[in-house]
Amino acid sequence: MLFSLIVFVILMWLVVLSLRRTGRLSREIAELRTELILLRHRVMEGAARPPGVGETDEPLPAAGEPGGIGGEAPPETPPFTPPETPPEPGEEAAQTAPEAPRGPFRPAADGQGALEETLTSRWLVWLGGATLALGGAFLVKYSIDEGLLGPTARVIAGLILGLALLVAGEWLRRRPLERALAEVEPSYVPPAITAAGIFTLFASIFAGYQLYQLLSPLVAFVLLAGVAATAVALSLLQGPFMALLGLTGGFVTPFLVEMGRPSAVALFTYLLALIAGSLAVVRYMGWRWLAWVTLAGAALWPLFWFASVWRPGDGVPLGIYLLAVFALFVFVRFRPSDEAPDDEAPDESPGLFGLEALARPEGIAWISGAAVAGLTFILVRMDDYGTQSIVVLGVLCAFFMVVARREPVFDGFPVLGAVLAALVLAAWHMPRIIAVRPHQYVGVPIVPPELTQFASVSAILAALFGVGALIAMWGSRRPALWASVSAATPAAILAIAYWRVKSFELDLAWAVVALGLAAVNLIIAERVARYRDEVGMNGALGAYGVATVAALSLAVTMSLGQAWLTVALAVQLPAIAWIEGQLRLPALRGVIVVLALTVLVRLVLNHNVLDYPMGR
């Protein structure tokens, strides 16, 4: 009884303060309306007066004085002097605006009004909403303790109370006075009441499912999801807090309802619908912070699934979910109102990886791409490098290149995809036992049959980046970056494959593959050299030149060992220096430095150099 009395007193105090503030605001709005009408009348009369007519050295009498206009005027209205010529449009307000009266949102002299405003418009309003929600919960608990209502009646009473609060919040928001006040500053009373209703509905439905077993898991799930969707929809009318409340409830709903054997298809389809609805609100309302909250929920659910629920066969629904999440977050970026104006247009030469986009609306797409890439890596590992997850990896890498080619601000995505592909291959689950077979380079694969899948995936990924980035390079804004991806990724994949399959043992068959890659890069470099005078193409030529040298170095490493490897690397130095001098490619200078340091280390820091046999 004491708690109920305290709750009643608090509610009455809130009502009295709200009514007092509402009355004061109504009076001041009426005063402002009167002053605006008077000001408009005086401006129109001054503009209609011909130039020179009625001009005096003294200002016209103020309203309310003899000769004034409009009778008595508020004492703070300043004198009015008409302009000599009719003012230009847009200058009337600046020339005739009176001193701003003390409005309803300026602090009162005694500080009491400011205190009341803070209490009633900020935390006290939300305290009242929380009190309403807790009051409903305690009412249900009291009925349980006293045995007044049965389980069904308790749940129904909670649902009725929640719906009543939703209706009351929306009804209050639609009142003319409340809408007028909302034009001046945000109103927190309607969303507080509506939030209390959302909370009551969530609690009632969950109680009907968990405590009383009145609802089946499917019905409870649908009802809770419906309440979350209602809250997100109401956010379009009642502000961002409702969107946050609905989004949180939507992500928590699957945790609250145990539906027997979890279904990846059902769960991630539901999550996609929730994410799409939330991002639609972000796109329409411009609440970018809500997109970050959505991304957090979208990334946490797959992690939870990997850790506790994963089963073989979940690769397809999870892969489709990850690809769709990335597509949705990229779509949010393409909002017309998010485009920068002409004087704030993005730099035509963004950084190498486009990371400066993190400070702009593109940041959410960048982080979503990184999150999806990380989750895809985990998916491939959890799926034990199955075909389904490998296909998802390939589609994601291709998607990265498509998005980057469409929007140059995302031209770092291909680099992200190349890094992802390299990490997947470097961490590949190799079989523990591989049959040892004699070397036969004619008609026999250069990798054991147990590693055929690894070799095939490596070749496909190398071709995807090598050919895809080469095609995207022509006509792009940054051909040097695309050329670097096209040239470097196949070389890196070849080096990783050589390490995982051969453990850096000498093998002439692998050296032949490296020589073939060097030849391909050389042919492309010759083609690019014809267009080196175009913007960015000189850098592209340098990228393929470096890749050619790298492939040759790989071939030397795969075929020679010990002393002869050092000799072969040293022989490349003058040849590369001559090419750099002829083509003026600064990128080759870095290659020369790296090769020189490698030779120096092998000669100076290797204490076994004098013990190398001269036969190899």
Image (cartoon, rainbow, N blue to C red):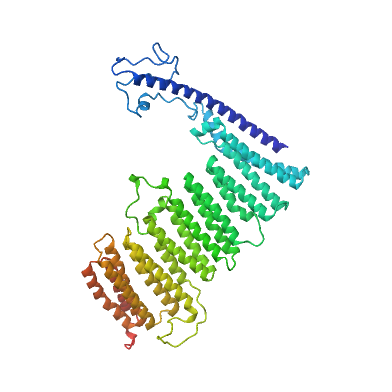
Residue 332 pos. (x, y %): 46, 51
Residue 601 pos. (x, y %): 32, 75
Visible residue check, residue 593? no
**From the viewer's perspective, is 315 left or right of 219?**
left
Choose between 292 and 177: the one closer to the eye: 177
Placement of 394 over or under 356, stated as above or below: below
Q: Quarter-wise, where is residue 343 in the image?
A: top left
Placement of 254 over or under 494, stated as above or below: above
Visible residue check, residue 568? yes
Residue 84 pos. (x, y %): 29, 20
Placement of 334 over or under 51, stated as above or below: below
Q: Quarter-wise, where is residue 600 in the image?
A: bottom left
Which residue is painted at 61% across and 47% down in the image? 227
Which residue is painted at 32% across and 60% down in the image? 475
Residue 12 pos. (x, y %): 64, 31
Placement of 440 over or under 575, stated as above or below: below
**From the viewer's perspective, is 252 left or right of 33?**
right
Which residue is painted at 27% across and 70% down in the image? 526
**From the viewer's perspective, is 83 left or right of 130?**
left
**Quadrant where the C terminus lies?**
bottom left
**Quadrant where the N terminus lies?**
top right
Choose between 122 and 316: the one closer to the eye: 316
Choose between 191 and 530: the one closer to the eye: 530
Q: How many marks?
A: 0
Q: Residue furthest top?
A: 66
Q: Residue furthest right?
A: 147
Q: Quarter-wise, where is residue 409 in the image?
A: bottom left
